[in-house]
Amino acid sequence: MSSKNPPNLANWLLSKMVGEELQEEFLGDLQEIYEERLSEKSRFLAMCMYWVDTLHLLFGFTSFKIFKTQNNNTMMLKSMFTIAWRNAIRQKQFTLLNILGLTIGISISLIIGLYVYHEKNYDNFLDQTNNIYRVNQPNIWGDWTEMSSTTGPNVADALREEVPEFREVTRILNQGSQFTSYKTKSGQVLSFKEDQLFWAEKNFFKVFDYEMLLGNQETALEAANSMVLTETAAQRYFGLDEALGQTIEMREWDGSSKSYVVTGVLKDLPTQSHLQFDVLTSLTSAKEQMDMHGWKWIWTAFSTYVLVDDGADVALINDKLQAIPPKYAPPTTKRIFNQSFEEFTAGNPWKLDLQALPDIYLSSDPPFNSFGPIGNKQFVQVFMAIGLVVLTLSCINFMNLSTAKSSSRAKEVGVRKVLGSLRNSLIRQFVFESVLFVSVSTILALVIVSASLDWFNLLAQKELTLEPVLMNPVVWLVLIGFVLTLGLLSGGYPAFYLSSFRPIEVIKGKISKGQQGKTLRNGLVVFQFSISICLIICSLFVQKQLSYTSKIDLGLSDENVLQIHNIEQFGFNTEVIKSKLEGIAAVTQVGKSFGVPPNVMTGDRYRSTEPDAQVFQLNNLRVDDDYLNVLDIEFLAGRNFEFERPTDQYSVILNQAAVELLGWTTEEAVGKHVAVASGNEDEFEVIGVAKDFNYHTTRQAIGPLILISDKNDKVWDYGAGLSFLSMKLNPQSIQTSSDLKRVLDQAESALNEVDASIPFEYSFMDQAFEDNFRTEQRMATVLNFFTLMAMIIACLGLFGLAAFSAEQRTKELSIRKVLGANTGQLTYLFSTGFVKLVVVSILISAPLAYWLVSLWLEGFAYRTPMQLGVFVLASLISLVVAILTTGYQSLYVASRNPVDTLKGE
């Protein structure tokens, strides 16, 4: 290095940190100063001062690459924010429309996102979720086309024997509602009704690793009469700390009690679990039921779960399972039905199918007899689509309004380009404004979502919460990515469009105001209204279908029918209770039944007694001789049960669907005989044919039904007493709420006289039918709300474009007014273009809505007709809303004094 040259390292450092456009100037100045110092002072001092000057430049006031980036970026952001703020204030109306539209769209999308996330994350809290499968099989008591989530108890034994890839196989059995009691230290007896109680095998916790607060998972369900409670259940009985070793009595069907010892306490199950229970008892406690060897392949009441080894080929295992029923089930079909396996299955495959645990809740085709809650995959898909649509509409609004207002910023762009702004900096400015709008809207949306979740949870019957989700760093990354992506998508087109203006043309006014991108803007408006009108049509048809199903002739009288539950708990005292209820003045008749419409779920296999008769699956309902009179069931032939006739004990009544299935006419059926196609094949005479009535939900067509005497002891015995007593109330006696309360109090007193320990529970049949569509009604309300929001977003965009159009066409309309056009003509001229866009939207949306509604209605047996009036109504609503949206701007422009507009020309 020459003695006159400055330090090479300092020059290299400057070259790396200073922009190329400034290097020559800085290095030249430093060289001159260095040479002056070198002539006056020592070389060492000159070099030291050169380093000081270099570092001074780097940390002081240069525009270098690394260290100054933060300050420059801060200044740049401040400048961009200032420009964005000024433009927002200058265009208050458009700013409000943009933020309002985006906020509504993002709010709805976030709520829907929380709902979808909740629905799609069932059972994911378990450590071994991805290795757990439920074993499903065809519903062998039906037509074999529907899958069932339950199997016979021996299926688990066969799986343990045949499939070594299963690390664990476990079974659970739903006990339904059970009455329990606990005697406190003070001698007080506390009684409870447990609605969620399962029997479970001792290895249950090896498959489902729920968190246990007290007790040992390995042994908690090992001994007979062991019981495991959830934390809430333990607190209800005796508190958490004193739970272990306590004794709880459980009532048996004959009125006796069995003692269970608490051996464990589980942490409360998350709501996102397809299994929901408060009490588990050891399956070894059900030894008597489990010893029913003859029925172990057809007693399809057990949910069977398997835990597979890591890396196991599930598809290969599924293939292996198909050989198990033909190998193990034939002895059962021969013993019970006197049929070979092939005869019993009638060519239908008895297959075992593994269903992954995370897929159970949102199954595309939920199997029959599922334990716990079942989600609606169709609703989730519909809401996902609505969320995307609403968000898309919001983005379209932003793009439309931004490009529409581009002409008002054209001169700004031209001047900034003349002053040296690069296209990239202009794009950065407009994208920044877009991201800023989206950020503000997202923050407002989070506030709105937090405030409205309680309402949504009440409506959707969910427990969605925002706070735990926001505690997840991944969610924040997603939100940031969402803001940036949406900002780029929403602001990208306006940014490139605005920055493409040539400054000379802009300054000379050669850019026609508001015409650039007009076709695109109109197309986006058509898209918005097409989606909104489609949603309106769908919402109207949903309401129409729900109204239609509520007015269907059920074939029975469901009004003023009071149903008393828990009757089976009274054992053999049901006749005493019935007599007491008949003594209530407001009661006209009382009937007994096992099951009540619309929840008749039991069935069996029957055939006619004619040679080579085919076996059919019939739903059955056990009733006494008063029950059909309570429901005002109409007879087409024959008569009702009359138990004064001894032969009626073994007689049956068929509905129309059953008669047709068996191949008879209504008149032929009376006097014919049917036989149970199992066991001893006892034969029963048909004494009547009842007109079809809905004993299931009206979503389903009426199926074949056989009505059996409650005194018939030759068919499956469902218990000593029947489950329900139904009371027909005199409507004249229950005209006020106090009248109804008096009747309920009298009914409760009648039951308490027999056994006061059994809770009084009741329902009304008409309400039960309505409850079958409660989910649809809730979702319809949500759909209506989302449809309204989508329409508001579309109208915000239309209003903004109308306002912009009014601003651009003010002089044109003023000149027309000077030339003689009146206010009505100007209003018509201004609005016609927007109305045409809505008409085009109607033509596009109608076929799409027709297709979507048709798909949805396929899930109903009784469907409302696709009437043209609904499409006309939706079209009128859209046109009226569009006219009202643009009407204000139309009247405002048309009524202005042209002198005020043209005086500056």
Image (cartoon, rainbow, N blue to C red):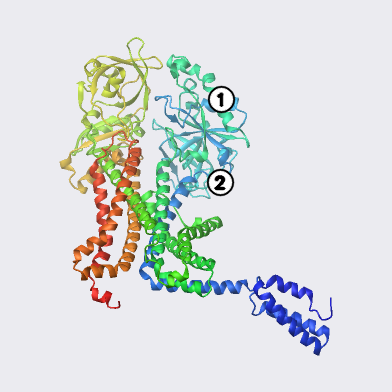
Residue 285 image position (x, y, % from top left) = 50, 32
The amino acid on which the numbered mark 1 sits, given as a three-letter code, is Ala
Q: Is residue 185 visible?
A: no
Number of residues whose C-alpha sits closer than 10 Å to that of mark 1, classed few (under 14), some (14–19) or many (20 or more):
some
Q: Which mark is residue 454?
A: none
Count all numbered tags in the image, as a single digit: 2
Q: Residue furthest left?
A: 732
Between the C-alphas of marks 2 and 1, the distance is 30 Å
User: Going 37% across and 27% down the picture, which residue do you hit?
Assistant: 718
Q: Is residue 878 above or below residue 743?
A: below
For numbered disc 1, what is the local secondary structure? helix
232 or 551: nearer the viewer: 551
Image point 71% across, 82% down: which residue? 29
Residue under numbered circle 2: 211
Whole-percent x, y for residue 385 in the image: 41, 47
Q: Secondary structure at mark 2?
A: loop
| Percent x, y of residue 168 | 59, 33
Determine the image quadrant of residue 548: top left
| Percent of width and height locating residue 92 | 37, 70
Q: Earlier in the sequence, mark 2 or mark 1?
A: 1
Quarter of the rendering containing residue 264: top right
Q: Residue furthest bottom?
A: 40
Q: Please determine whether, in this image, residue 238 is positioned above or below residue 652.
A: below
Q: Which residue is mark 1?
A: 158
Query: Type of residue at label 2?
Result: Glu
Quarter occupied by the C terminus: bottom left
Q: Nearer the viewer, residue 338 or 260?
A: 338
Q: Nearer the viewer, residue 69 or 191?
A: 69
321 on left or right of 67: left
